[in-house]
Each structure stands twice: as structure tokens, then as C-alpha cells.
Image: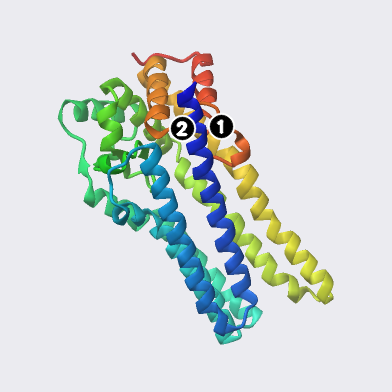
Amino acid sequence: MEKEKNKKVYFKRKMHLAIGEIMILEMLFGIAISANLIYVPILYLTGLSVIFIISYVDYRIEHRYRKISAEFRKYGKFSFLMVIIFTVEILFASLREMLHLTLWLELLILNIFFPVLLFIIYEPPAARKLAHNGKKLSGPLGARVEELKNTMGVSKTEVYVLNWDSMKIANAMQIDAKGKHVFISSYLLNNLSEEETLAVLAHEFSHVKNKHVKKSMLLSVVPLWLVLNLVLLIPLSGFNKDLTLTLQVLTIWIPIIFLIILFPLIRRRFEMQADLDAAMYVGKEHTISALNKLSELSLIPKNTSTLWGLSHPSISRRIEKIKESRNNFGK
């Protein structure tokens, strides 16, 4: 009971930090869009300070609850993606103010930028960098993984082990849309049995087999691209100023509602499908055992509310669904 209570405190603090960071940075971006150019550098430095402070507070939470041994210098690297996103937003706001872009030029830039973004997301440089820094899974376990890959029809996917012991990251992931790489952390690998490891990797291979990353990419980027086009086209439709602004605000809410409510629901369905595939190929017992260990290693509460907009169902719900499934030829 005490363990679950600590998990919930840890989880809530992490989620509050993540949500707070996004809200503050997007508020700063919103101000930068309409602010005088001389204030943009101040807003940018404020945003970077927010990222640094939240990253440090997050590090202290990890140090307190999960006793990680990594230095903040190493842990803080995980905030680099947020720095890139915020920098791109501020650059857009600055260029928009400096160049006094017309709506047609903004449309042109938007429709050049998004295909480039899709290409980068389709095969992200981060995947290649992680593969370069990791090492291929080998040995007797590697041979069993090769057999599992062939059975599941994902023989071209390579599995890499990432040395994240000092940060106690218990995770496995597939992040490129082509499905060329699957990563598993050394901390997770060292704390699971061989059968549990196979269950975790079968879950990731299911994502590859069912093209979940590619579908998620298209579902997140394409609607946003369409909505931004619509927002820029509305002023060209001849409506009066008040109606134009109202329609733009209403349109902007479409991707926000989708990404907060519908997209996480779709992602949770993908995760459930991957769980059921893992249970089918490796066995229910090992898949459930792996989920329970993941809860302990990552301090994830067994029951988490969908109101957080999480991409994964709660662990208790995942275990319940696995127990209810009929397919279990994996032993």
C-alpha cells in the first residue's frame, strides 16, 4: 500500500511538471507571435530558463524517489528536444514579425515545411544516433529474439541495448516509422527474466508489424497541417474581421481537442493490441509479470486516470485485458 502511495505521489509530480512546462512554453510562444520584436529575445530566454528549472526539479524528483545516480548534466540532455521545439516556435514568431509575410507566402512556407517535418519524423536522426550509441543484442537471448522476430514477421528490425543504468530508465521503444530499430534499456534488461524480456520485445515488434508509429505520426502531423492551412485561408474568404477571428480560434481548437482526447485514445488502443500480441507469442504469464516489474522499476501506479491524456492504458487495465484474451500459444 505504501509503495502504491509513493508511486502516485511520484507520478503526479512528474505529470504536473510536464503539463506545466508545455502550458508555460506555449503561452510564451503565443505572446511572441503578437509581441514587438524587441521583446522576443526576452521571451525566448524566459522559456529556456523555464525548461532548465523544470528539468532540474524533475531531476530532483528522480533522485529522491528513484535514487538515480546520474549527474544532472547527463539527465538534463533529455530536455534537449523541448529546447529545439521552443526554438523553432520562437524563430517562426521572429521571422513572421521581421519579414512581414503575406498570407500567401505563409501558406507557401507552411506547405514546404511540413513535408520536411514528415520526412524527419519518418526516420528521425535520433533513432540512428541511439543505434550508434547502443549495442546490438547478442548471445543466447539474441538468438531467441531472432527466432521471435522471424515468427512475428519483423526479421529486418534490429534490437539495440542502451546503457541507461545510471538514470534507472526501464523502457523499450520503437521510434522510427520504418521499424528498423527497437531499443531496450540495460536497466530494464538487467531486471527482467529472459521470458519477460521476450514479452517486452514482442510488444515492440507488434508496433513494427502493425505500423503503429507510422500511423501515429500521420494522425498527429497531418490534421495539424490541414488545420494550419485552414487558419491561414480563412482571412482570404472575405469574412469581416470579427467573424474571421472567431473562425480561426474555433479552428485552432480542432487539433488541440484531437491531440488531448482522441489521439491518446488511439494510442492506447495500439498499446493494448501490442500487449495482446506479446501475450499470444510469448505467453500471458510472462507478459503480465513484465508489466508488474515495469510498474515497480519505473514507479508507475497500477491505476492511472485517462484524464492525464496518457498514451498507455493503466497497468491494471492492461493486465485485465491480457487475462481476458483467449489467444495464448506462446509458452
Report, in whole angstroms, how far the alpha carbon at label 1 lies from the one at label 2: 8 Å
- Classify residue 174 by image quadrant: top left
Residue type at mark 2: give it.
Answer: Ile
* x and y, in percent, of residue 70 in the image: 28, 47
Q: Quadrant of the C terminus?
A: top left
Where is residue 255, by image quadrant? bottom right
Is residue 35 shown above or below 123?
A: below
Q: Position of residue 83 (x, y in %)?
A: 43, 63
Quadrant in which residue 298 is drawn? top left
Left or right position of 25 against 200: right
**Image height of 242 relative to 163, above or below:** below
Residue 304 shows which numbered tag?
Answer: 1
User: Seen in the image, is 102 located left or right of residue 287?
Assistant: right
Q: Secondary structure at mark 2?
A: loop
The answer to whether 115 is drawn above or below residue 132 in the figure is: below
Asked whether the beta carbons under mark 1 and mark 2 sit within 8 Å of each other, the answer is yes
Horizontal and vertical percent position of residue 9: 51, 36
Residue type at the position of mark 1? Thr
Residue at image coords 30%, 30%: 149
Dot label at residue 322: none
The residue drawn where x is 28% and y is 27% is: 191
Nearest the camera: 52 or 200?
Answer: 52
Q: Residues within 10 Å of mark 1 (few under 14, many from 20)?
A: some
Whether residue 311 is visible here, answered yes or no, is no
Q: Exactly how many numbered labels are in the figure? A: 2
Whether residue 291 sits left or right of residue 227 in the image: it is left
Disc 1 on helix, strand or loop? loop
Residue matched to label 2:
300
